[in-house]
Amino acid sequence: MRYIKILLLSAAIASISPLCSAAEQSDSIPEWHLSSTEEFSLYRSDATDWVSCLDNQVGSFAYDANSLSYGKDGEKDNTQLVEVTVRTIFAESPALKRLQEKYKPQLNTKEKVTYWLMKMQFDINRKCYTVLETEYYTNKNKKIDSVTGTGEMKPVPAESFASAMFNICKEWSTKK
């Protein structure tokens, strides 16, 4: 897979290199613009640094590296608790179809449920977690629902997305 990515990147660079040399020789350099549809704007990195961590049948999971922080215990930071914001871009699956049906009344024409943002909290010493809040978004980046979690800590299941995020949070907390 790694070699395929390198091969594709090399082909892309090779295909635009004649354009670059032609632009250098010309007096009038064409003005280039990057464009994207609003549908793909959720990939933009305005104030976030999304790091991909897992892909499965549910979707592509990434976390905002800038969101990693200690949880609060009253007014003080609790170094045992680590909070992080996670984004899941849904793959075509039965779960996504259920979400489309659930939120159908809130969706406009050509809108569909595309991703969610979850604020998660991990207890590093007890190896458990909770979802503090989940926000559902459309392909037009419109928030259609926000669900507050119960705050109940659950054990981190082995070989799961929660397990992968627990390890990332644990590593972050040891480097802090």
Image: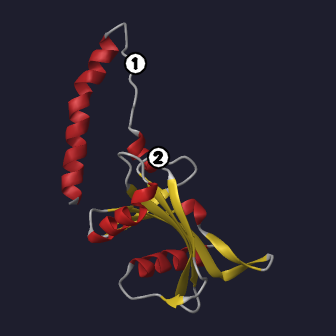
The residue sitting at the front extreme is 105
Above or below for 93 versus 26: below
Picture coordinates of residue 26 (x, y %)?
32, 9
- Residue at image position (37%, 81%) is 160
Picture coordinates of residue 104 (x, y %)?
39, 59
Return the residue at label 2: 44
- Residue at image position (40%, 18%) is 31
What kind of element bears circle 2?
A: loop
Residue 97 horizontal side relative to residue 107, left or right: left
- Residue at image position (44%, 46%) is 140
Picture coordinates of residue 162 (x, y %)?
44, 79
Above or below for 76 versus 28: below
Residue 150: image quadrant is bottom right
Observer-nearest of 16 and 111? 111
What kind of element bears circle 1?
A: loop
Q: How many marks?
A: 2
- Residue at image position (38%, 49%) is 111
Observer-nearest of 162 and 103? 103
Which quadrant, please, contains the C terminus? bottom right
> Which numbered disc, 2 or 1, marks the residue that appears first in the sequence?
1
Above or below for 25 versus 80: above
Amino acid marked by disc 2: Arg
Amino acid marked by disc 1: Glu
* Picture disc at residue 31: 1
Which quadrant, please, contains the N terminus? bottom left
Observer-nearest of 54 and 176? 54
User: Mark 2 or mark 1: which is in front?
Assistant: 2
As measured in the structure, the alpha-carbon distance from the residue carrying label 2 to the one carrying label 1 is 22 Å
